[in-house]
Amino acid sequence: MLGYTTIGVSDMARAEEFYNALLAEVGAKQLFGMDRIKFYGTGPDAAMLAICIPYDEKEQHRGNGWMIAIPGGSKEGVDKLYAKALELGASDEGAPGDRVPDVFYGAYVRDLDGNKICFMDMKMG
């Protein structure tokens, strides 16, 4: 259902360093890109995350009320991603923990440009 999601960044080199290291933790890598946009994922047939310098060349700004959710694969995976993001300079937006017991475990950070990211593990049924 989801092809890719794009978030704006202000410094491509800095953002690449952050996302290259962070997304490697879940087996994703930079798949392709150009000067102003880079696509990350596990393959072109799966959902991807793109980082970009805005096309209109105006200043990047984060949205309020939206975020990107990256599956951690397990509670331990969520914890690992959260710790890695903080190590890479992200800021805390909510430590790992059960949000809906036995269903949703999540952690929240803001990347280097203030974009909100959720690391999550969801078990339904």
Image: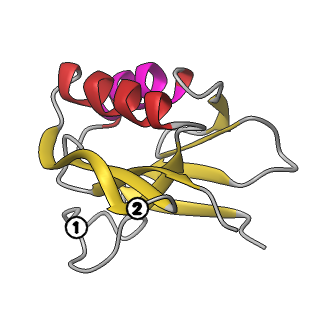
Residue at 30% x, 33% y is 82
Q: Position of residue 96 (x, y in %)?
A: 27, 43
User: What sort of colour scheme is used for the picture?
Assistant: secondary structure
Report the residue at 19% width, 63% height from top: 59
Between residues 87 and 4, which one lies in front from this camera angle?
Answer: 87
What amino acid is at disc 1?
Arg
Q: Is residue 9 visible?
A: no
Q: Position of residue 73 (x, y in %)?
A: 60, 38
Q: Which residue is mark 1?
A: 62
Q: Residue at x 43, y 19 (%)?
A: 21
Q: Is residue 30 visible?
A: yes
**Highlighted range, magenta:** 15-23
Mark 2 lies on residue: 101
Q: Is residue 22 magenta?
A: yes
Q: Return the x and y of residue 52 as percentages of the image width and height.
A: 43, 51
Amino acid under label 2?
Answer: Pro
Q: Is residue 68 magenta?
A: no
Q: Is residue 61 above or below residue 19?
A: below
- Looking at the magenta stretch, what is its main secondary structure? helix
- Quadrant for the N terminus in the image: bottom right
Task: Mark 2: give few (<14), some (14-19) or many (20+) Cα within 10 Å.
Answer: few
Mark count? 2
